[in-house]
């Protein structure tokens, strides 16, 4: 059984990950949690910070109602005891935790994950350290691309060498990458001789997160009142696009925050030219190929055979759920008529998908940890700030 240190057990990723992970199934066990002290309620003086932490798990995953309890300074989840320490990553004596650990998961903030020195503190107690956000100054470990065909990626993965600190990308990054994985698998299956991505665009409808607030504090999307108020923001997904497709036309037009439960929604546009011997690509064949990938990689991709609303996929753990209906999955071969002008045609593929920014993302995090503790050589994407992985 591999030992995990979880740093950060807030209302979203950390607590969801703690509730989802099943040692008997995943081969991973959270052996310790380090998180900020949880506020108590003076109206309930008999309840402690541990009870507040328990509330985070149950209210985030109500199905855990009768499977989570508190025993002293530990949470008990499905009969498994998880000891908890309250403190700050910046100054907590990590050596006092019951390590060593196989993987440390930092689920605190983007600023922490982007701080290589701070992340490096965790190496004193863990073999690998992963951050649950994008940080282009760190090597990228992207779960949906593990084992993907890379022939048509401008930037290929490379051996990890001595690198032990990685960024997993954001929740929206993983949703977009799952769809990119489907396109790469389609290109291999169709026998394309050439695939040149000319443009990548994604529009996002993002469920509100606990960092939001009622009332308006500022112009920032997270600090505006979410009630009856669509708030345009932006996602880290564009940074991940630039890491894989440097110099390309990569665009996240909007991440529209809405007061709704996950999953959210993505509309992805892939513009590409391609070469193939024989018949050209067609929409139904692309949808069929995506369906085959979904059956082979259910934790990466799923197809919505019926176009249910988002509530139908609240418990789905795939990184993305594509809606393959002809009215929603659209493919246009040479929509700009470029071939008639004697230049390579640029085709457009539009995919629409549900992206679960908590449950689906946590499954990606679990799969990344399973990859790290496995036997295969590690392949990662280089930091954008360095030419190579190095030591």
Image: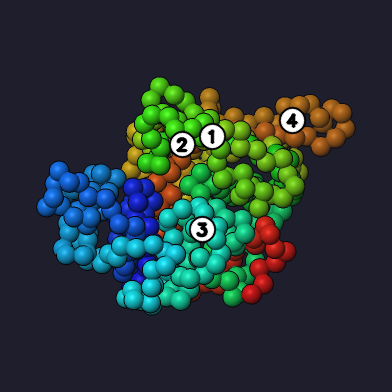
The answer to whether the residues at label 4 and label 3 have Cβ atoms under 8 Å apart is no
Residue at the image point whose x is 42% and y is 75% from the top: 125
Separation of residues labelled 1 and 3 (CA atoms): 21 Å
Q: Secondary structure at mark 4?
A: loop
Whether 95 is drawn above or below 248: the answer is below
Mark 3 = which residue?
A: 113
Is 330 placed left or right of 358 in the picture? right
Among numbered discs 1 and 2, the one appearing first in the sequence = 2
Mark number, residue 222: 2
Among numbered discs 2 and 4, the one appearing first in the sequence = 2
Mark 4 vs mark 1: in front: 1
Query: Number of callouts in the render?
Result: 4
Q: Secondary structure at mark 2?
A: helix
Please tell me which residue lies in front, 278 or 288. Answer: 288
Task: Where is residue 170? Give x, y as percent.
Answer: 51, 49
The answer to whether the residues at label 1 and label 2 have Cβ atoms under 8 Å apart is yes
Mark 2 vs mark 4: in front: 2
Whether 76 is drawn above or below 42: the answer is below
Mark 1 = which residue?
A: 233
Mark 4 vs mark 3: in front: 3
Q: Secondary structure at mark 3?
A: helix
Please tell me which residue lies in front, 41 or 311. Answer: 41
Mark 4 = which residue?
A: 334
């Amino acid at each position: 059984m591999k030992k995990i240190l979880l740093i950060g057990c807030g209302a979203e990723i950390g607590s969801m990950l703690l509730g989802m992970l099943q040692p008997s199934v995943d081969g991973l066990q959270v052996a310790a949690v380090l998180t900020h002290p949880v506020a108590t309620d003076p109206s309930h003086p008999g309840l402690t910070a541990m009870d507040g932490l328990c509330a985070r798990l149950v209210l985030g995953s109500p199905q855990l109602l009768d499977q989570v309890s508190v025993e002293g300074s530990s949470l008990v989840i499905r009969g498994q005891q998880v000891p908890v320490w309250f403190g700050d990553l910046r100054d907590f004596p990590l050596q006092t935790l019951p390590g060593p650990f196989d993987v440390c998961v930092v689920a605190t903030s983007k600023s922490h994950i982007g701080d290589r020195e701070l992340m490096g503190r965790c190496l004193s107690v863990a073999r690998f350290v992963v951050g649950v956000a994008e940080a282009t100054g760190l090597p990228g470990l992207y779960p949906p691309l593990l084992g993907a065909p890379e022939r048509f990626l401008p930037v290929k993965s490379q051996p990890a060498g001595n690198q032990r600190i990685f960024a997993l990308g954001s929740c929206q990054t993983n949703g977009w990458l799952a769809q990119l994985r489907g396109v790469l698998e389609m290109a291999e299956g169709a026998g394309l001789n050439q695939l040149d991505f000319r443009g990548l665009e994604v529009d996002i409808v993002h469920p509100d997160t606990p960092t939001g607030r009622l009332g308006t504090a500022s112009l920032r999307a997270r600090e505006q009142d979410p009630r009856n108020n669509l708030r345009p923001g932006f996602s880290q997904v564009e940074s991940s696009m630039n890491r894989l497709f440097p110099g390309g036309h990569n665009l996240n037009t909007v991440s529209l925050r809405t007061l709704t439960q996950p999953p959210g929604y993505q509309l992805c546009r892939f513009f590409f030219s391609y070469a193939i011997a024989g018949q050209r690509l067609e929409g139904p064949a692309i949808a069929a190929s995506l369906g085959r990938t979904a059956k082979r990689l259910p934790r990466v991709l799923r197809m919505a055979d019926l176009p249910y609303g988002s509530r139908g996929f609240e418990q789905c753990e795939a990184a993305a759920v594509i809606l393959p209906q002809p009215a929603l999955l659209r493919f246009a071969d040479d929509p700009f008529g470029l071939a008639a002008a004697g230049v390579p045609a640029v085709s457009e593929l539009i995919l629409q998908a549900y992206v679960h920014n908590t449950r689906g993302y946590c499954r990606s995090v679990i799969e990344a940890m399973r990859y790290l503790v496995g036997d295969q050589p590690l392949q990662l994407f280089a930091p954008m700030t360095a030419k190579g992985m190095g030591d």
